[in-house]
Structure formats: C-alpha cells, structure tokens
Image (cartoon, helix red, strand yellow):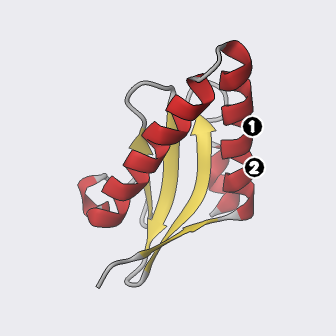
Amino acid sequence: MARRLVVQPQSDLDIQAATVWYEDQQSGLGARFLNELDQLFLRIVANPRQFPRVDDEVHPALLRHFPYGVYFHAEEASINVLAVLHLHRHPEMWKSRN
C-alpha cells in the first residue's frame, strides 16, 4: 500500500519562500529546487526508513544540490512533512512543529 504524502501548511510556506528566493536569484533556479524536492518526496514515500531518525519519530532527508532538509514523520498510511528548512539558518525549527 502506497503512503500518502501530507505537506503541512507551514511546510508549504517554507517551500514557497525558498522557491521564490531561488527564482529571484536566477531564472529557473526555483523550478530546479522544486524538481529536486519532488524527487526527494518520491524517495521518502517509497522508503522512509532509508532516512535515519533524529528522534523517536522524525526523519530528516537532505536535498543534494540545495542546503535544505525535509523533516518528516512516517506513519503506516501517510508521510507527514513537518518542515522544509534551510540547514544553515533554521536547522532546529522542526522541533517546534512536531
């Protein structure tokens, strides 16, 4: 059974802000960020256990070409994205969203 990906509203705002910032830096860079994020979401849904836990329930997954991490909680039927954060600015903010 495939898990459903649930992006929490605050995580969606994280994604929008990063996309706008990258697009402002260079045309097309925001789209590249979103594409890499979508690919990471597919990997997370396919096998969330490949990403080690940072506490009892939360897993971080890192983008390869952007300094961002996706913090998620895996349940039997869904993957809940708690935060999508810049690793150098807000690496611990996910804790307030757990």
Q: Which element type, helix, strand or loop, lies under badge 2?
A: helix
Rendered image quadrant of residue 11: bottom right
Residue 79 is tagged as none
Where 85 falls versus 81 (above or below)? above
Asked if residue 49 lies left or right of residue 9, the reply is: left
For the residues bearing labels 2 and 1, Cβ distance under 8 angstroms: yes
Q: Amino acid at mark 1?
A: Ala
Is any atom of residue 57 visible in this view? Answer: yes
Q: Which element type, helix, strand or loop, lies under badge 1?
A: helix
Asked if residue 14 lies left or right of residue 43, the reply is: right
Q: Position of residue 31 (x, y in %)?
A: 57, 33
Is any atom of residue 60 visible in this view? Answer: no
Asked if residue 65 lies left or right of residue 84, the reply is: left
Crowding near pointer 1: few (<14 within 10 Å), some, many (20+)?
A: few
Q: Amino acid at mark 2?
A: Leu
Crowding near pointer 2: few (<14 within 10 Å), some, many (20+)?
A: some
Kindly identify which residue carries mark 2. 13
Residue appearing at x 31%, y 54% in the figure: 43
Q: Residue furthest top?
A: 25
Cα separation between marks 2 and 1: 6 Å
Q: Position of residue 61 (x, y in %)?
A: 40, 46
- Depth order, front residue of 8/25: 25
Kindly identify which residue carries mark 1. 17
Q: Position of residue 34 (x, y in %)?
A: 54, 40
